[in-house]
Amino acid sequence: MRGPWNRPLAFVVNGAEVSLDAVRGHLQSRGWARWQLPNRVEVIDQIPVTSVGKFDKKALRARLEAPNAKSEATAGRHPENRNADTPQ
């Protein structure tokens, strides 16, 4: 799923304090291109699903907009979201 500024992000289910660096490192080791790597990690208890069992993207997006959402953000071109991989 893409987050603010159309950058990739990852939702991790029951990820006991997983770090952004750990997720990015794992995906890089599996051959993901740098532009595909998430710049933000959201830890959630479970993936919300619709009545037919598909991922509920609207619920995930609403979670991102919630004021108390816990995340590790380091992405984008915004001052509060810096990333060494993204040219400034």
Image (cartoon, rainbow, N blue to C red):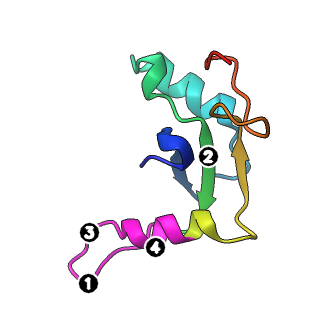
- Nearer-N-terminus badge (4/2): 2
Rendering quarter of residue 49: bottom left
Q: Amino acid at mark 4?
A: Ala
What segment is highlighted magenta in the picture? 46-62
Q: Is residue 62 above or below residue 85?
A: below
Residue 58 is covered by the magenta coloring: yes
Q: Judge depth for marks 4 and 2 and give the one in front.
A: 4
- SS state under label 2: strand
Alpha carbon distance from label 1 to label 3? 8 Å
- SS state under label 3: loop
Q: Amino acid at mark 1?
A: Ser
Q: Which mark is residue 54?
A: 3
Instruction: Give the residue number, with chain letter if any, for mark 4.
Output: 59
Instruction: Give the residue number, with chain letter if any, for mark 2.
Output: 41
Alpha carbon distance from label 2 to label 3? 21 Å
Q: Amino acid at mark 3?
A: Lys
- Nearer-N-terminus badge (4/3): 3
Kindly check if marks 2 and 1 are in contact, taking CB atoms under 8 A apart as contact. Answer: no
Q: Which is the main secondary structure of the residues drawn in magenta?
A: loop
Alpha carbon distance from label 1 to label 4? 13 Å
Q: Which mark is residue 70?
A: none
Instruction: Give the residue number, with chain letter if any, for mark 1.
Output: 51
Q: Furthest residue to the left?
A: 52
